[in-house]
Image (cartoon, rainbow, N blue to C red):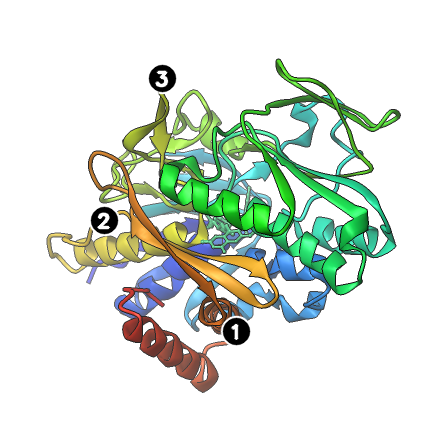
């Protein structure tokens, strides 16, 4: 057999799943290489529990090498340039040639896009940020906490709302809830606009029941750290005591430099196959631009949200398609737009949103009543994701599959 090299850029959610699935599907003569700049992997959904103090840093991180099957090569280096014509990637360590390329580089945060934001705001969108925010919340004894979503798109549309509810829960536990005013600001017209008005109203009610004010259509334009004041486009300024921000997101610049990105910097792909316009080059997860039915505002088309569940599903589809091609079969697997999200609400309770994002005329998403089950599901998923390959991981996978089947949810793990 003609040996092939599959090169995966980024060893986060999508890159790890793609590498492991390809190793499972392909004979050993084919090379699977993951280029990842960080030696440690941190599980992003648990940043919220790091912020609340429910997780220690070491419980939500693992060496990347422990999370891949044997036979997946990890190159710990920064990918610097992609040359699609030469089928070559320049990294900080060496040049790598490929037969198939999977781009799974995720997003970067760009707080500098909002004047005054850098240094003024905390964030739970990074590992270090969540640890620092935990300390700031511990030291906070009263006043106004502003939680600002700065720009669209951002990853995990549920996370800012979860963050607000978990912050409220921290102060409830400390008996300080009455002294802390929590206000959420977002440029979106409602919570999770992609999921439609009914679900948006349900999330608004969840926030209200926790005493959190929700301010839609508030686009942050500047922060004054001296006066602790937020400026919004076309709205009155707002004073805060502690600022928590979801900074603007951007795609890593090397995809733009390689001519793979659209004007906004994201990589457009065929929504079913995740193929880019270049032969044997795929992009998966947060770095992609996938338009979906429906409109965010009358003039703005909706995009598939950036979420780990999609990165995971994309990775499986692409791994199967590449393996089929190498094995001389016609690839059949397609991404169908299904997704789900467990929405932490505090007090060890969570809601569960599930649906199809390709449904016409707009995504069909259902929010199940909050309960303990969904919280336990999220904890189990965390344990499964961070377990090294072996019996424990397999048992956790079976438990998750059994739980999902009992609830009638087609969860892939
Ligand atoms: C607080 C928080 C909560 C979340 N909760 C959920 C949730 O409950 N459910 C859900 O589905 N999603 C959730 N997400 C979103 C989820 O984490 C992301 O959507 C998911 O990680 C995207 O996977 P990805 O593979 O596209 O990118 P990532 O997982 O971000 O992986 C990208 C990888 O590429 C590496 N990289 C970047 N540039 C380079 C380079 N030049 N060279 C080498 N390596 C590079 C990065 O180090 C990283 O490891 C949450 C995110 C946050 C921040």
* Residue underneath mark 2: 336
Residue 306 visible in the snapshot: no
Residue 388 visible in the snapshot: yes
Position in image of residue 252 (x %, y %): 53, 35
Discs 3/2, front: 3
Distance from Cα at disc 1 to Cα at disc 2: 27 Å
Position in image of residue 146 (x %, y %): 71, 37
Within 10 Å of the Cα at label 2, are there few (<14), some (14-19), or many (20+) other Cα atoms?
A: some
| Residue 68, disc | none
Distance from Cα at disc 1 to Cα at disc 3: 42 Å
Q: Residue at x 54, y 67 (%)?
A: 65
* Residue underneath mark 1: 383
Discs 1/3, front: 3
Q: Is mark 3 within 8 Å of ligand 1?
A: no
**Quadrant into which the N terminus falls:** bottom left
Residue furthest bottom in the image: 391
Within 10 Å of the Cα at label 1, are there few (<14), some (14-19), or many (20+) other Cα atoms?
A: some
Distance from Cα at disc 3 to Cα at disc 2: 25 Å
Query: Which residue occupies the foreground of this view, 211 or 259?
Result: 211
| Residue 299, disc | 3
Query: Which residue occupies the foreground of this view, 8 or 360?
Result: 360
Within 10 Å of the Cα at label 3, are there few (<14), some (14-19), or many (20+) other Cα atoms?
A: few
Are the two marked residues, 3 and 2, in contact with CB atoms closer than 8 angstroms? Answer: no
């Amino acid at each position: 057999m003609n040996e092939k090299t599959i090169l995966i850029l980024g060893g986060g959610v999508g890159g790890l799943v793609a590498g492991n699935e390809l190793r499972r599907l392909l004979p050993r003569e084919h090379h699977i290489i993951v280029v990842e700049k960080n030696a440690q992997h941190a599980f992003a959904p648990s940043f919220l529990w790091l912020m609340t103090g429910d997780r220690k840093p070491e419980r939500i991180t693992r060496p990347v090498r422990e999370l891949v099957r044997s036979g997946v090569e990890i190159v710990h280096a920064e990918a610097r340039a992609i040359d699609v014509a030469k089928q070559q990637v320049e990294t900080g360590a060496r040049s790598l040639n490929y037969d198939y390329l999977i781009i799974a580089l995720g997003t970067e945060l760009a707080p500098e896009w909002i004047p005054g934001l850098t240094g003024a705001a905390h964030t739970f969108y990074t590992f270090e940020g969540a640890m620092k925010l935990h300390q700031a919340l511990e030291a906070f004894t009263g006043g106004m906490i502003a939680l600002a979503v700065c720009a669209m798109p951002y990853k995990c549309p549920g996370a800012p709302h979860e963050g607000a509810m978990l912050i409220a829960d921290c102060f409830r536990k400390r008996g300080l809830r009455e002294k802390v005013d929590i206000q959420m600001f977002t440029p979106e017209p409602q919570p999770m606009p992609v999921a439609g008005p009914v679900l948006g109203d349900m999330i608004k009610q969840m926030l209200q029941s926790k005493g959190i004010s929700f301010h839609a259509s508030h686009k942050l334009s500047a922060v004054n750290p001296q006066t602790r004041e937020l400026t919004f486009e076309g709205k009155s300024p707002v004073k805060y005591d502690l600022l928590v921000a979801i900074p603007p997101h951007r795609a890593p610049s090397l995809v733009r430099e390689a001519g793979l990105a659209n004007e906004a910097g994201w990589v457009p792909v065929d929504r079913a196959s995740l193929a880019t316009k270049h032969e044997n080059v795929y992009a998966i997860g947060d770095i992609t631009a996938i338009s979906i039915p429906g409109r965010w505002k009358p003039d703005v088309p909706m995009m598939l949200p950036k979420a780990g569940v999609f990165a995971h599903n994309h990775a499986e589809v692409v791994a199967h398609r590449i393996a089929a091609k190498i094995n001389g079969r016609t690839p059949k697997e397609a991404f169908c737009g299904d997704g789900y999200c467990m929405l932490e609400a505090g007090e060890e309770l969570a809601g569960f949103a599930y649906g199809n994002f390709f449904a016409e005329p707009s995504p069909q998403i259902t929010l199940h009543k909050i309960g303990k089950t969904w919280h336990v599901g999220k904890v189990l998923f965390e344990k499964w994701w961070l377990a090294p390959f072996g019996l424990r991981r397999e048992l956790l996978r079976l438990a998750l599959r059994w739980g999902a089947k009992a609830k009638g949810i087609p969860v892939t793990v």
